[in-house]
Image (cartoon, helix red, strand yellow):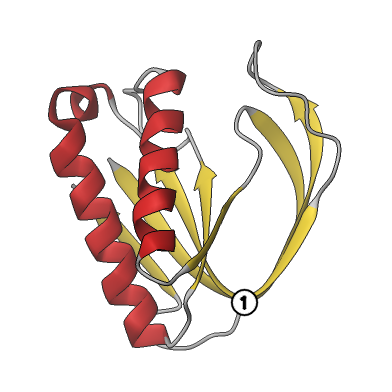
Amino acid sequence: MRVIFWYMDSFTYHPAVKGLEGAETVEEGAAFTDALVVFVHGEEKDEENASKVETKLVKNIKWLSGKLGSKNIVLHSFAHLGESKCEPDFLKQLFDRAQTRLTDSGYTTAQTPFGYFLDISISAPGRSLARVYKEF
């Protein structure tokens, strides 16, 4: 798994183009403030270690959000960080489990529409730990 964690003062999206056949139809966008937006690229090898990868993702999110002082999390599928890709259903299920774990731990957690290309507007500060790359 490859992940870019990006702290944003504001993050707004609107679904533009459905890129994954069979994805749920979504027409509404959303806006978030003071959020850690987590760009996740799932790899083929992650499917063999689903539980381990999920735990590492959640632990990294909790650690970094604690350092940034934000409990607002947005999970975003970003299949552009490597050549190997996991199955879309695997990543969506991982997102759902991670969201449940984070919500149960007191985080406000959301997902961008899975399988869509999005129109995105962001405002991100230039501060320590506002942008972090992790591979596991």
Give the quadrant of the N terminus. top left
Would you place residue 4 above or below residue 34 in this image? above
Q: Which residue is depicted at the point 31% across and 70% down?
A: 62
Residue 10 shown left or right of residue 26 in the figure: left
Residue 136 location in percent, x, y?
A: 18, 47
Dot 1: within a 10 Å radius of its alpha carbon, few (fewer than 14), some, or many (20 or more) residues? Answer: some
Q: Which residue is mark 1?
A: 124
Q: Can residue 111 be seen from the camera position used here?
A: yes
- Viewer-side residue, 10 vs 134: 10
Label 1 residue SS? loop
Q: Which residue is depicted at the point 54% across and 85% down?
A: 126
- Viewer-side residue, 132 vs 18: 18
Amino acid type indicated by mark 1: Ala
Residue 42 location in percent, x, y?
A: 35, 33
Q: Which residue is depicted at the point 28% across and 53% down?
A: 57
Residue 32 location in percent, x, y?
A: 69, 68
Residue 51 shown left or right of residue 58 in the figure: left
